[in-house]
Image: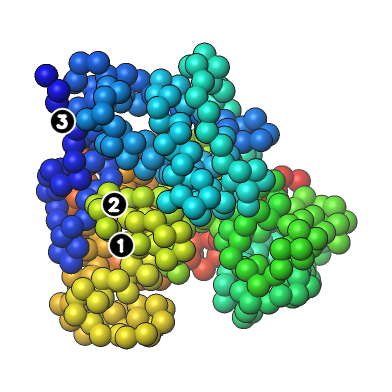
Amino acid sequence: MTVSAPTLTDIPVACVPVLDAGFLPAVLWNKAYRALARDIAGSRTLELALVRQDGTAFRWNSPLLPDEPAHAPATLHYVERVLKFLLWQKGGSRVLIAGAPELVPALAAIYAPGGARAFDSEFIGKKIFGEPLSFESVDAAALAAESGDAIALGRHLGGCRIGFDLGGSDRKCAAMIDGEVVFSEEIVWDPYFQSDPAYHIEGVQDSLTRAAAHLPRVDAIGGSSAGVYVNNEVRAASLFRGVSESDFEARIRRMFFELKDRWNGIPFEVVNDGEVTALAGSMSLNENAVLGVAMGTSEAAGYVDPNGSIRPWLNELAFAPVDYRENGPKDEWSGDEGCGVQFFSQQGVARLAKAAGFEFGTMPFPEQLVEVQKAMKAGDERARKIYQTIGTCFGYAIAHYADFYEIRNLLILGRVTSGEGGTIIIEEAEKVLASEFPDLSIKLVVPDEKTKRHGQAVAAASLAAV
């Protein structure tokens, strides 16, 4: 007897988002698929390895439904969605599959030029890891072993240090002596559409020089910035979107090596701002296994593992699917549906504001957020429903993230979470976790005022060992 695979419409959702009734939590769909695969006769095990050119490899495995035509659509949907998550969470360019050879041509077609996931293939494969995304069927014994050591960065507070953070509207910089901030400032800049690499390089140099003026010497420099950074090399970052490809390769890709040389080769480390945010939270809480999620212009994330280390992962959860409904909200950049950015960012607020009955027209997303925050302060029930919806969806997303991360503490921050709206988001997320996932023990926390003011700079400054 053939048992039908789960569909996208028969998964019970106990906590329905008030403004987004069609939301289909990825965590529930995946759980239903795995349960069915475990119980059905003829099930099998998929072993998957995600490998980078340098040999770094990540492994994932799961039970799969039998290789039968009736189950093929559900299995492909399940594996493609999880693979998309893994690509943006951990990152790699070579996908090795054992136990389900029929998936290889199907996935290759989806991620091929012109395919549904062509954006992801181009961005992760060529832009970040320098080669096209490839798929190969192998025997389980031939799969690459898990590798990729933790990065021993952070928590170095001794000496005279500079920490900086590069954002889309300002660059922050601080000087620190033995863990105490002695100087900090924010300088407004407009990097997005600046075509001259010197604007970016000299801007950072200017901030470093201004901070150094408040120190007797400089022992180490650490920085954070939105984007993907591998071994201090800029691989992809929206800050440099105005720079031509040739200038990016010639000056921007190794700009932090150039700056290090200007500072006489002292220890100099730069990582993604999400990682530094998580590190700052870990240092403030004196806790490890911290996933930090910032809801701002986009959804940014970073992770500190149970040993207190940063991992060599991407953690770009804005592109990670959290909603499996058909015809779900579409990411304007990648064209994919149901990704985190459409729920946990200013874009998510704007999307829900329309559903709540606000008429903002073509008003920019940051201004829409400000109007929703004003409405929340005024007691507007429409605004409350927006935050309730975000919180409910976030509760399910947290449980989904917990399938891929070991999380004991979840740090929540960003403009979307400021004020009373942030409190509502946390309350609704906790309701979901308590009712649907009582076995999860995850503490939701917001940074204290000291961490908000100086935590990012202190954590960045602490990256490099002397």
Amino acid marked by disc 1: Pro
Dot 3 falls on a residue whose secondary structure is loop
Amino acid marked by disc 2: Asp
Specify few, some or many for label 2: CA neighbours under 10 Å numbering under 14, 14-19, or 20 or more: many
Front label number (3 vs 2): 3
Q: CA distance from mark 2 to mark 1?
A: 9 Å
The quadrant of the rendering that contains the N terminus is top left
Identify which residue is drawn at 57% across, 51% down: 122
Q: Is residue 58 left or right of residue 36?
A: right
Please report contact status of discs 2 and 1: CB closer than 8 Å, yes or no: yes
Specify few, some or many for label 1: CA neighbours under 10 Å numbering under 14, 14-19, or 20 or more: many
Identify which residue is drawn at 42% across, 60% down: 335
Identify which residue is drawn at 69% across, 65% down: 175
Residue 164 is drawn in which quadrant? bottom right
Could you tell me residue 407's position as x and y percent? Answer: 38, 41
Q: CA distance from mark 1 to mark 3?
A: 27 Å
Residue 227 is drawn in which quadrant? bottom right
Q: Which of the labelled discs sits on residue 329, or is there none? A: 1
Mark 1 or mark 3: name the one nearer the start of the chain.
3
